[in-house]
Image: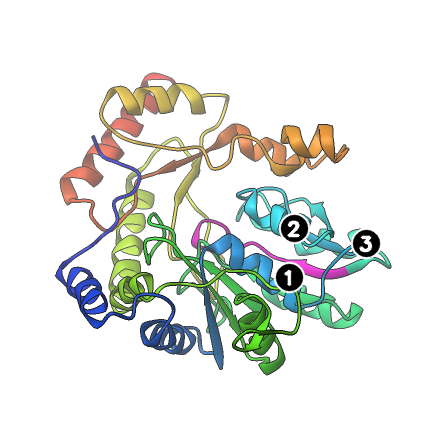
Amino acid sequence: MIHMAKPQMGAEEKQAVMEVLDSGIIAQGPRVKAFEEGFAAMCGVKHAIASSSGTTALHLAMLAHGIGEGDEVITSAFTFIASANSVLFTGAKPVFVDIDPRTFNMDPAKIEAAITKKTKAILPVHLYGLSCDMDPIMKIAEKHGLAVIEDACQSHGAEYKGKKVGSMGTGTFSLYPTKNMTSAEGGMITTNDSNIDELCRVLRQHGMRVRYYHDMLGYNFRMTDIHAAIGLAQLKKLEKFNAQRHANAEFLSANLKGVRTPFVPEGQTHVFHQYTIRVPNGKRDALRTYLNENGVGSEVYYPVPIHKQTFYVKDLGYDQSLPETEFATTEVLSLPVHPALSPSDLETIVSTVNDFMEKNS
């Protein structure tokens, strides 16, 4: 079976973990600090703050920007539910806008109509490894005095006009095992704002600036040195991993037939956390079945948009139409693109998709 994801762990990661275990410093310590410094350098920012997951990174970023009860945050409904749930965790409300059908990212042209007196921030989600169109988003945020919190949980190393994602607003990243790089579990916040940096550090450790003196309500959102050691080893490999993902994606796009392959706008670097095609004419589910029968994994990211999830409809009362978002859920299909794929795997993926599309044209 050609799997959708395969974390790349080698001798470097194993040695790094053993060194931490031998050191006796297992909780948040020097490896976390080193990982933060390395990640900040990769993103081209002054500060990076490690956390226990991508979700807690989002939550901390919201809190550090003062988002709370009665506030609104504009975001996309076409993403993993943690993007919107992190807004709910603060007592604020996610406000959804539709996507650009070519990129699957938030459509900047839809944002201003969603702004109200309660709007506190914009949360663009860099989906699948491709940056949102950040210039208009940043201009809108500046015009209306809004914070920008980038959900870059799927886009480690992606670039927008020469700038790394996570460097334009306050960035948030996931380090889950299936991501382009991993710490086994963990998250990261990136910022050039020293006040946001300091607040995130205090909030992730029980509201403490000085040990056992608690200045505010905080959380235990820390990363361990074990996770950071893995993350440090992976960070050194990220550029190589992303280059292989890009090469794999180029092969797929050059050879797949009968489907719409990923669109990459000029001036952007896609890191292909997912390689997502659009399958027309209601054939997506049948193609997925055919792929599985022929030993090729695939996944639908995401079958139900957030504004149509049961909890959001029944408990929170969401009732809106996002036509492009809803249509995308019927066509999108992600194919394997990870660095462990062999040339033979790539040929199999292409031939299986093309065989189905030719038989069902």
Res. 167 in view: no
Left or right? Give the position of 31 relative to 164. Answer: left
> What is the C-alpha distance between the residues marked 2 and 3?
12 Å
Q: Position of residue 217 (x, y in %)?
A: 65, 64
Q: Are marks 2 and 1 in contact (CB under 8 Å)?
A: yes
Mark 3: secondary structure: loop
Residue 179 drawn at (x, y percent) = 36, 52
Residue 306 appears in which quarter of the rendering?
A: top right
Relative to 19, 179 lies left or right: right
Residue at mark 2 = 89
Q: CA distance from mark 2 to mark 1?
A: 9 Å
Q: Nearer the viewer, residue 264 or 340?
A: 340
* Residue 103 versus residue 279 in the image, above or below: below
How many other residues sit within 10 Å of disc 1, few (<14), some (14-19) or many (≥20)?
Answer: many
Above or below 64: residue 14: above
Residues 251 and 22: in front is 22
At x 67%, y 68%, the residue is: 65
Instruction: Give SS at disc 2.
Output: helix
Residue at the right extreme, as displayed = 117
Mark 2: amino acid: Phe
Tell me which amino acid carries mark 3: Gly
Quadrant of res 199: bottom right
Inspect the magenta stretch and tell me whether residue 129 lies in it. yes
To which residue does mark 3 refer? 70
**Mark number displayed over residue 62:** 1
Mark 3 and mark 2 in contact (Cβ < 8 Å)? no
* Stretch of the chain drawn in magenta: 120-130
Report the Cα–Cα distance between label 3 and label 1.
13 Å
Left or right, 329 with respect to 358, comes to: right
Q: Quadrant of the C terminus?
A: top left
The question of residue 12 being in magenta is answered with no
